[in-house]
Image (cartoon, grey):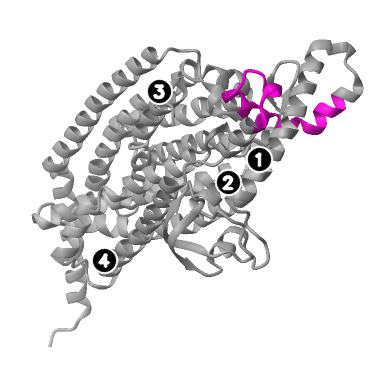
Amino acid sequence: MEFGIVELSRLQFATTVMFHFLFVPLTLGLSILVAIMETVYVMTNRPIWRQMTKFWGMLFGINFALGVATGITMEFQFGMNWSYYSHYVGDIFGAPLAIEGLMAFFLEATFVGLFFFGWDKLSKVAHLVVAWLVAIGSNFSALWILIANGWMQNPVGAEFNPMTMRMEMTDFFAVLFNEVAQAKFVHTVSAGYVTASVFVLGVSAWYLLRNRHVELARRSITVAAAFGLASAFSLVLLGDESGYSATHSQKMKLAAIEAMWETHEAPAPFNLIGFPDQEARETHYAIEIPWAMGLIGTRSLTTEIPGINDLVANAEKRIRSGMIAYEALLEVREKREAVDPAMSAQFEAHSADLGFAYLLKKYVDNPLDASEAQIKAAADDTVPTVWPLFWAFRIMVGLGFGFIATMGYFFYRASFKGMNFPRPALHMAVWMIPAPWIAAELGWFVAEFGRQPWTVDGVLPTAMSVSALSMTEVAITLAGFVIFYTILFVVEMGLMLKYIRIGPYQDVEETDAWNKRHQDRLAGRRSADSIATPAE
């Protein structure tokens, strides 16, 4: 593959967005876990839960700050590196991002300060409300971003305006309730909850191995295991829902993930393992689970899932239909008010395939000049590279089931074995800390790489979306981002490790006061029992 401005721009965006996504899952999950811990503190008034809230809240704050710093870059890249994309679909894509900034990020950023500096200035209930508003803001932020991203995967509620040469929103609620966006949101936040649960579990296990902060660690494991087990189950189930929605909106992505070259008689099997050969269009040494893919992808035993070869043939038909739309578009724009109604009708009939004609611009300036070989090459371009999608998906799923097993084990030990955890299990929990980040990055890779060659699926090819920049300009900014983000990563890891080693701050006065009240209650009960029990 020739490496040009498109590929370099993609590499730059992938580098920045996947680095930013290192911070997002932990922010989503820790915000909820911290709010849960403070809820228990307000209900029980026990200092240990306040200590837990402050400690995990401090780690949340470090991660939140780095997430904000790396996330701002994304906004600028749309206008700087992907200017035609911003021009073409900005009316739709910009709306949820604007709402995210005004509603969710404003809520989150406003109350995060009150959370850290309001302990002695707010009542317990008021501070608890602040903690939940921070958590809600964090998750709302993810919702609106994923609504924007979901529209790129399944562009509903919009249509192309031939006069402005842009996509325009026609139904905001169709964009809001897009099935792909909703499935992505619940799946992504579940991944964040699992990430935070594994993080809390691993750090707490590290404390227990060193016999430090034992009470905080045991209670943290109990909360993380219960929350993580529910989240891990939902992660797998909601991932299945994402696969089902892809059957309707992104058939090629689903076929590529499964390395399904031919349309299989329903119900299709699931390739558990294999070695995809894109050049030969077959998967070597495949081990199949009968019926599984049909049930996952269609929820039925009678509906076929199209294979890659049939989807390529369909893409070729849509390219030819798009060429008709492109020719009619030129006529409509040239004559405008005096356009022939028949030509307008012809454009309307084929306008849904206009984006497929744009795939030809990779080969010729005017799609109408494309040769038969170029049309077939453009149709082949609709197949993303299969083997990385195939393996990334399977590693991600395998890790997902591993999270269920791990959380289930620790939940069992916490609930039925008196919070007694064997040392090998604690070591495993520590070593498992990076696993959810690996799974989250692989999931993001599958979602975005599987959409190629489209920036907006079926509407705007990636090759048309980039800005008119030189390779040197993009390469210099890419190098700058790598250096800057590496520094931020070192700072992040240094701060997190520093405060984990220091451990939680203990409010001695509050702890002593609680212990005194607790002892007074016990003394009062013993006194009452002695009065109620007659002396022998």
Distance in Å between CA atoms under marks 1 and 3: 36 Å
Q: Which residues are magenta?
A: 344-372
Distance in Å between CA atoms under marks 1 and 2: 10 Å
Packing grade of label 1 (10 A; few <14, some 14-19, many >=20) is many
Mark 2 residue type: Met
Sequence-first tag of 3 and 2: 3
Q: On the image, numbered disc 2 is attached to which residue? A: 252
Q: On the image, numbered disc 3 is attached to which residue? A: 72
Mark 3 residue type: Ile
The residue at 51%/44% (across/down) is 185
Distance in Å between CA atoms under marks 3 and 2: 32 Å
The quadrant holding residue 268 is: bottom right
Mark 4 residue type: Ala
The residue at 29%/67% (across/down) is 409
Judge whether residue 358 is colored magenta: yes
What kind of element bears circle 2?
Answer: helix
Q: On the image, numbered disc 1 is attached to which residue? A: 315
Sequence-first tag of 1 and 2: 2
Q: Is residue 326 left or right of residue 53?
A: right
